[in-house]
Image (cartoon, coloured by chain):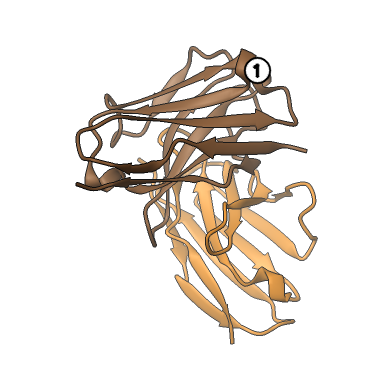
Chain colours: A brown, B orange
Amino acid sequence: QVQLVESGGGVVQPGRSLTLSCVASGFTFSNYGMHWVRQAPGKGLEWVAVIWSDGNNKYYAESVKGRFTISKDNSKNTLYLQINSLRAEDTAVYFCAKNPCSTSCYFDYWGQGTLVTVSS
Amino acid sequence: DIQMTQSPSSLSASVGDRVTITCRASHGISSWLAWYQQKPEKAPKSLIYAASSLHSGVPSRFNGSGSGTDFTLTISGLQPEDFATYFCQQYNGYPYTFGQGTKLEIK
């Protein structure tokens, strides 16, 4: 069965950097697009970024463009999100989510999320 | 960006009831709409994609309809496990956007 397990969250000071990971299993990771979606405490869902199966096509929400970088390592079945210059408004649970297509479409499976808290 | 507006923001209902949640897009999105269910402290789960197609394993009491700008999610015969928050999401183009959510509570 499909499993997505995020890690890398924690309490981080403003301005610092962090890399989140999402290890995938139960499907051929290299064949599908993958996303990051975040949810601030008590708030709704916000799409963050997508990477297509080819690894070359990447798109970002305007709120994170230039600070966040999505990437993946097919040999490790792992999706990454590098977050630079962290701000208080980046505090959220970060979910990785799988596409059922190679480019980008809806999310058929989600990980359990990892909490990032930006605080001094 | 395409704005997604859900209504109502909260809803009280009883087991066995039929409820409808609506989602309106600020621009036409054809049928590129999905619905998700989220329980407290849990990840969202896929319910419906392409406006009306049921995700694998989702009970048939969930039904989605609509196209263009207006969409609905109907749950017939509410079960105790259905009390949760529901989000719509458009995937017509980037940035993907979500509705603000509808919290379905037990009356």
Could you tell me residue B95's position as x and y percent? 40, 36
Could you tell me residue A56's position as x and y percent? 49, 12
Query: Which residue is under mark 1?
Result: A30
- Quadrant position of residue A108: top right
Element type at marker 1? helix
Could you tell me residue A60's position as x and y percent? 38, 29
Image position of A72 with respect to A61: above or below? above
Image position of A36 with respect to B22: above or below? above
For the point 57% across and 41% down, which residue is it? Answer: B32
Could you tell me residue A8's position as x and y percent? 45, 35
Left or right of B13 in this view: A13: left
Q: Nearer the viewer, residue A71 or B95?
A: A71
Residue B85 in view here: yes
For the point 54% across and 38% down, which residue is it? Answer: A6
Q: Which of B105 and A73 is in front in this view?
A: A73
For the point 57% across and 52% down, which residue is it? Answer: B43
Label 1 environment density (alpha carbons within 10 Å; few <14, some 14–19, many ≥20): some
Image position of A10 with respect to B82: above or below? above
Residue A106 in view here: no
Q: Which of A16 and B17 is in front in this view?
A: A16
**On what subunit does the disc labeled 1 rest?**
A
Quarter of the image for the N terminus of chain A: give it.
Answer: top right
Q: Which amino acid is tagged 1?
A: Ser
Most extreme residue toward the bottom, as rendered? B107
